[in-house]
Amino acid sequence: MKKLIVHIAILVFCAALGNAQISPGELSEAHKELEGMSNCTQCHELGNKVLNSKCLDCHKEIQELISNKHGLHASPSVVKQDCFKCHSEHHGRKFDEIHFDEDNFNHSETGYELEGKHATIDCRECHMPDNIQNSELKKKKNTFLGLNQECLTCHDDFHQKTLSQDCIQCHGFDAFRPATNFNHDNTKFALKGKHIDVECIECHKETTRNGKEFQEFTGLAFDDCIACHEDAHEAKLPGDCKSCHKESDFNLFFGQKTFDHNLTHFTLKGKHQEVDCYECHKETDNPLLVFQDNLRITENNCAKCHDDVHDGKFGQDCAKCHRETSFSSIKNIKSFDHSVTDYPLEGKHLEVDCKKCHKTGHYTDPIDFSACNKCHKDYHKGEFAVNNVSPDCVECHSLQEGFDYSLFTLERHEETNFPLKGAHVATPCYACHVSKEKQRWTFVDMGSECVDCHNDIHEDFISEKFYPEQNCTACHVNDSWSSIDSFNHSNTKWPLTGKHQDVACSACHFSENEKNKSEIVQKFIDLDSDCIACHENVHEDKFAINGVTDCVRCHVTTSWMPENFDHDTTNFPLEGKHREVDCKACHTSTIIDGKEEVIYKINKFECIDCHS
């Protein structure tokens, strides 16, 4: 504290003597605004030397470079030194603070090594305001700050933004021309053959753009040779020149295996791909005539070049049957027009694989097609043979529908030993003609009796008198088994009368087995003819005589109405208006033991018993 007071006292005392007696010397032009004793502490610290931190507080652009580790001040040999070692002060207004040996200065310490032409030019040719982008740094006089390493900071863009801004991809530091780093193989058009020897100017023309000298390196057409070269064929040959020619020499032809013949109207396939071009085309040196012959030959006109071994029998479109891989190799033969042969294909024959008929593999070998059985086995095994000769299949079958479909009509069935009638007309053929034993269709020895096909469910249940020799037609007809038109019930002991004539036979003759409900019991012999054997006795014993209720005393078979009942035989004969009264008016019903019951026996006959 005492030392600080002493320093202040000295400074105050010296101030009385004048500034010249305190300052070591006049400041430079750059720092002249800091002249005067009151500004000393802007750079100096009392009792200490000039601090770097105070310098950097003002020179923030240097501090930024050091922080980002860029430039000379950030280099290892400089960043550790004090600022005043290079930039001393108090030497007068004209003293240049930025003084160093430019000839021996190591520019590599700035982070940018000078190479080629850069090593020989004067520093001020680069470090000039025009090359500084920062507006504040540009104001500083004789500054070396503000430059970056991009070429276009100092140099004009000759290519006017048509190429990359990274010039060293192509150019070196010795000279802009030639572009020693440029490799044409890295472009979309690598140089090969004769192109290697061509001067750049031949393709990349020099011109003027925006009033400046310019050379074209982009936007050039190179997809096809004719973009640069004259088409000697005058567009008569399709495709790219490179498919036939190489860069080594246009006069050499390499197109045998590289030319895409599919670009023409004649696509090469199979063996055609192996044929030398000049087996089909005439050799010529004239570029306007080469490969221009045979232009009108179509792909399916094989006979134009090949011999027709079929002598025109199958037409000229060989490609329908043959492949280009080999004439002996047959492709989709189904496309062959069989109608040009002696046996046009129809119906199901159109779907048959050719090899099924042409078994030798040679499609021109003759085939006997005079009858179906020449190719097809007799499924019926001679069942229809007459005198050991079977009829041809076409009498019953057609090519359009196949063997599963028969042309044998119902009308033709009428000509057989078993004409179809009634329900037999609607019966499918397989129901009778598919043999379970033989597991196939059969049409002989079928039998003509009903029991030959149908099970006889009445066997031993109907008397031989009414069922002679299991003759179903004694009762049944062809229309339906349930239709019984032939049997005359009057021939039995119980002729049918009235409503009984309308009742189905099964209602009386069939019943469920009491032990097995799914089993039907039939009975035709010794049936009970009493009414109560079939009908419920609703009267129970009310009208029984000697324990027997004889229904016919009152009822008839035409209806349940008691038409045989005579009211005069009762204790109340009907007279006068009583004959017109409905039975229900007197014989009312009541509930007895939970059942509805009609009162038929009335014991009160006085008028007052019924009338008010």
Image (spheres, grey):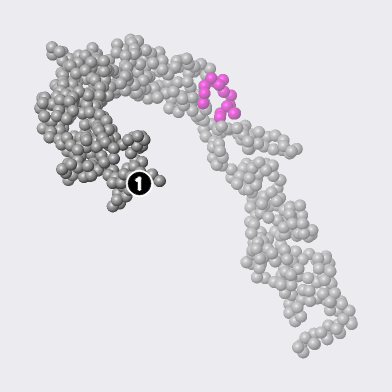
Residue carrying label 1: 609
| Residue at image location 21% in from the left, 14% down from the top | 415
Name the residue at 15% across, 35% down: 527
Is 378 on the left or on the right of 329, as rendered? Answer: left
The amino acid at mark 1 is Asp
- Image-quadrant location for residue 213: top right
Residue at 32% of width from left, 35% of height from top?
Answer: 575
Q: Position of residue 372 (x, y in %)?
A: 23, 16
In the rendered image of this protein, does residue 566 appear above or below residue 480? Answer: below
Along the line of sight, the residue nearer the viewer: 242 or 608? 608
- Using the rendered image of the protein, determine whether residue 567 is visible from the camera's viewpoint: yes
Seen in the picture, residue 594 relative to 484 is either above or below; the reply is below
Q: Of helix, strand and loop, which one carries label 1?
A: helix
Q: Name the magenta segment's main secondary structure.
A: loop
Kindly identify the residue that appears in the image at 22 percent across and 28 percent down.
497
Quadrant position of residue 511 = top left
Task: Report how many numbered discs are placed on residues in the image.
Answer: 1
Q: Position of residue 463 (x, y in %)?
A: 11, 29
Looking at this view, is 6 or 545 the one in front? 545
Specify the quadrant that holds the N terminus. bottom right
Residue 61: say if magenta. Answer: no
Tell me, yes or no, whether the highlighted magenta stretch contains residue 238. yes
Q: Position of residue 526 (x, y in %)?
A: 12, 35
Is residue 374 visible from the viewing direction of this image? no
Q: Residue furthest bottom?
A: 2
> Mark 1 Cα within 10 Å, few/some/many (few <14, many 20+)?
few
* For residue 459, side relative to residue 406 (left or right): left
Give 134 or 441, whichever is nearer the viewer.
441
**Residue 174, position as x, y percentages in the image:** 64, 47
Query: What segment carries the magenta color?
Result: 224-239
Task: Judge whether 12 appears above or below 73 on screen.
Answer: below
